[in-house]
Image: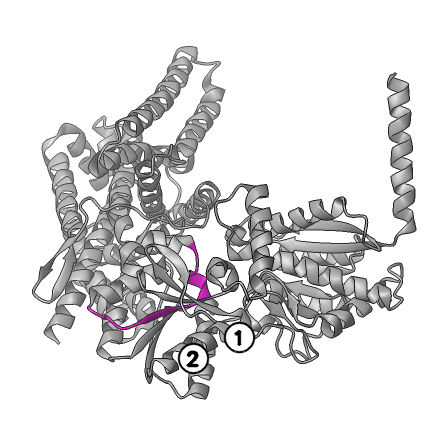
Amino acid sequence: MIDTALFLLVDGLTNGLVYALLALSLVLVFTVTRVVNIAQGEYVMLGALTLADLLQGRMPGTLYLLIGGLTLCVVLDGSRWRRDWRQALLVVLGAVAAAAFAVAITRGALWLKLPVIGMMAVALMLVAPLGVLIYRFTVHPIPNASTIVFVIISVGVSMSVQGLGLLIWGASPYAVDPIMPGGVMMGPVFIPYQSFAILITALLSMGGLYLFSEFTLVGKALQASAMNRRGAQFCGIPVTAAGALAFLLAAAFSAISGMLLAPLITANYEMGFMVGLKGFVGGAMGGLIDYPLSLAGVMIVGALESTSAYVASAYRDAIVFSLLIPILLWRSSRQRVEGH
Amino acid sequence: MKILSAAIIAMLATSTAALAADKPELRIGSVVAMTGPASALGLPEKNAIELRQEQLASDTSLPFTIKFITYDDGSDPTKAVNNVRKLITEDRAHVVICCTTTPTSMAILETVTQAKVPNISLALGQSVIEPVKDRMWVFKTPSTDQLQVTGLVADMVKRGIKKVAFLGLEDSFGEGGWIALQSVAKAKGVEIIASERFSRTDTNFTPQALKVRQAEPGAVYIHAIPPSSALVHQALKRVGYNGPIYHSGGSANNAFISIGKKDVEGALLGTTPVLVYTDLPDSNPLKPVIKSFAALYEKRFNVPKVDIFPGQSWDAVNIALKAAGEAMKAGTKFDDLDASRAAIRDKIEGSIKEFVGVGGIFTYSPTDHLGLDERSTFIAVVKDGEFRLYDSK
């Protein structure tokens, strides 16, 4: 009995940590840009598949997305060329340089045959900029649209990215090497080293985000735009850039979570969406604005998921998603208390 | 010079046309999933049809000429229906080979039944051909869950296993396995003591594995496809389950081994003969047929080892050809579309007996549109990272 509980707890918390990185991304994006990003889970998939490609010594398909996106960026900014050719030239040169840099580091990494950690860093550098590109295409043109418009757009983004993933990588799953193979017996429970890697990476990422937003000027600017967009703008903070930065960081966190998850469940084109939704349920606990509460939320989601899979496997997703109802009731009751 | 060669080409063209005009034309239409999620199955199927087409192009011994028309359904039922309609009305196909997946094959049932066109499906699901009285025009070449589960449960009985636990995907694929296991286990007196579900996008399979281990089954049957089938297998090992683990044919592919690695050593899988034909005794009639097909296919498409899918469409084409040949012998005129379609259907049902194909030995009858029996289903075991024949029949 005890060992069953231990097993469920360990796995639940491991998954909770993976969802935690997702919840972090969602909160970050929502506070800075007011976008409820349903597509956040797709970066999980992109991160995992990019890592799978790199580890198997292939040029990752993510480069197509990156170079395609940069090209589209240049085309979209083309209308401004007549007015300001200097800036146009800068945009073009920047895009070309970025694309060349991406290809160069990928080539270099493949040539050097970096260890898993190194490949993860390269994959991160390829996936995170996609967040900025998607911000440029979807949110940047309509900064003052309502939340519901952004939700619908992000559903569209999710579908498109998943479709592109299927096109590039096909439907077959890819096995991904863990950071460290093997594991350790703790009492009756076998824990793979990858679970520890997830724990450490998740803590480092969260700590990194905290330090960044508390102790650097850029981080403080990001915090300011999250608290009061207009006020930040009056203080001279470029809120558009802040939005792009939020998308960049969020894409990076989600990609990391995908790369950590992939050795446990393989990488495939449809892995991201569900993970994203579960991160969302956890994030809802913090109303998508409160980091600590969101983290508590995802841990509850992870633990509930593994227990419900044990007790009634056919209903585990239904149980996890119906957690949203008590969460929302609790939040609205809290809000009423605060309001008075 | 140019004029001369042009004239020769023109002459040649007219003479082959004239030659062709002597013979009636048989039109075989096919719709497979060349794109979309099922393309991993559909592309090899298309390849096999192409291979047969190339072979037949130089074959003048047939009493008819053959025109192949192949469309893509993008793994989408609506597109499958549209393309089958097009095959029936515009291309005036005599036989339709459609489709790759069970959902697409189910979608076109009504279209082929109403138009009275014989259809040979490449889908796994038994519901495509049963009940036979409503599915008069539909046949299929792949084996079924029912048949494979029968083979596996027979092995459990042989080992003296009385209790089995089921672990399956929670979609229609898993449901098919669950229904098959229930009926077979009941018939063979094996008790199902646990049934757990999971989905392809799950991130954790340990809870279900724990539950199953604690039910203390004699064997576990997993009905899923990789990656989840391999991951569930690993989870069972991780929680300390050491009994035999059986898998459906859905796991009989290289992805299963490349994901499960050492953990799936000893896994037992229900499968078609293609996967293990090299281990079959030479006396088995299937061996030479599969061997020559594998050699052809592997050479033409430059693949290291043929998988089960191209054989399914290969068999479908050959069954259609044989039935059409028989229908012609019986005096059917291919110009009369309705009569020849009906005649070909009758001949598939009536003249395909003990037909040795790549996927098994087919014997169709008015009550059996699957045509396969236990001689065509085998158990493979994973040994040193390869599929080997487990129980030599």
Verify whether residue B370 appears in magenta.
no
Magenta segment boundaries in residue numbering: B240-253
Host chain of mark 1: B
Is residue A297 left or right of B4 when viewed as pictured? left
- Looking at the rendered structure, the kind of residue marked 1 is Glu
In what element is the residue under mark 2? helix
Host chain of mark 2: B
Which residue is at the far left?
A: A187
Residue A102 at x, y = what percent? Answer: 33, 26
Verify whether residue B246 appears in magenta.
yes
- Looking at the rendered structure, the kind of residue marked 2 is Ala
Residue A11 at x, y = what percent? Answer: 19, 61
Q: In the rendered image, is residue A46 in sight?
A: yes
Q: Mark 1: give few (<14), some (14-19) or many (20+) Cα within 10 Å.
A: few
From the image, tell me which residue sits under label 2. B154
Is residue B82 left or right of B115 when viewed as pictured? left
Q: Between disc 1 and disc 2, whose residue precedes?
A: 2
Residue drawn at the location 33% of the way across and 85% of the way down: B162
Which disc is residue B374 wearing? 1
Residue drawn at the location 66% of the way across and 47% of the way down: B50
Which disc is residue A257 wearing? none
Q: Please say if B124 is above or below A211.
A: below
The image's colour scheme reads: one colour
Residue drawn at the location 34% of the way across and 69% of the way down: A318
Total label count?
Answer: 2
Q: Please say if B196 is above or below A30.
A: below
Are dots 1 and 2 on a single chain?
yes
